[in-house]
Image: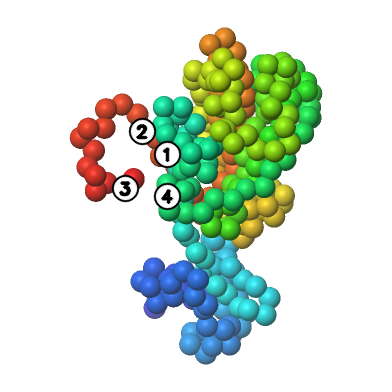
Amino acid sequence: MSMQPKYRQVADALRREMDNGTFPPGSRLPSESELSARFDASRNTVRSGLSLLVAQGLISSSQGLGYEVSKNEVFELNASRFENLNFPQNGDAYSTDVVNAGRRPHQTFRVELRPAPEYEAERLNVDAGATTVLRFCHRYVDDVPWSTQATHYPEWLIKLGPRLTDPNDIDEGTTRYLASLGIEQVGYFDEIATRMPTPDEARLLEIGAGVPVLLWTRTGYSKDRPIRCTVTTFRGDLNRMNYEIGDLAARSENEPQ
């Protein structure tokens, strides 16, 4: 006889059935009353088990529609190729990578002059509150919110690259645009962290309870100073990142890409 609380037994049984395909991604679970009868448990007990699965990001709930198994169509980003000017692109790196994966990109966009937050100011080597150009993208893959990207550029770059303040997207990507002006990004420093989303992040990315975000900060450098700080916030359940470093001739083509 299981020593686990009944609600955990309910959650474990449903999790196994999601794993074995009984309830595939996008399918709806039986109603609370049906689960109560199946597990010989009260509605409150069943609801607690379902709430545990919601908190783990495995299912989502909608009022009047019951519970749905989460869809995890993961998009894989090769971070070592991202924005690499030697890698063929048809536009900016995000659109190119999504199209090459056989998916459909879409993004909304805004540009504003604003004081540098402390986090970005430290990486740009400017005073906190100094004016920066913020270029903010809200990105989708197949109409599903996938990430937000906030890039801050220091004020001194505006005179050299006036299109940075253009309210429209830069078709070739800002890294290529700056390189065409002789401001070449010769290196970058990446930082990766995870945490639970803020309310704004949860709203923009349509994140359910229990799903973390992946924060990817990339600070780009010219030969003598930092030229931008990009913070990309990914849905933790729909994204995976990889890097290619060194000689990978021994890597099998059958290994995960």
Vertical placement of 33 versus 131: above or below? Answer: below
Image point (63%, 34%), residue name: 170
CA neighbours of label 1 inside 10 A, class few (<14), some (14 to 19), many (20+): some
Q: Which residue is mark 3?
A: 256
Residue 73: where, in percent of width, then height?
A: 46, 58
Q: Which residue is disc 2 drawn over?
A: 244
Q: Are marks 2 and 1 in contact (CB under 8 Å)?
A: yes
Mark before the other along the chain sequence, 2 or 3: 2
Q: Nearer the viewer, mark 4 or mark 1?
A: 4
Disc 1 + disc 3, Cβ < 8 Å:
no
Query: Three-letter amino acid code at disc 3?
Result: Pro
Label 2 – label 4 distance at C-alpha: 17 Å
CA gap, disc 2 and disc 3? 12 Å
- Looking at numbered disc 1 in the image, what kind of residue is underneath it? Asn
3 vs 4, front mark: 4
Label 3, secondary structure: give it.
loop
Residue 16 appears in the figure: no
**What x and y, as percent, mark residue 159?**
73, 17
Residue indicated by mark 1: 78
Residue 7 vertical position relative to residue 207 in the rendered view, above or below: below
Residue located 70% across and 38% down the image = 168
For residue 119, which quarter of the picture?
Answer: top right
Look at the numbered disc 2 and give the secondary structure of its residue: loop
For this rendering, which residue is in front, 134 or 168?
168
The answer to whether the residues at label 2 and label 3 have Cβ atoms under 8 Å apart is: no
Q: Earlier in the sequence, mark 2 or mark 4?
A: 4
* Residue at 58%, 25% in the rendered image: 177
- Distance from label 3 to label 4 (Cα)? 14 Å
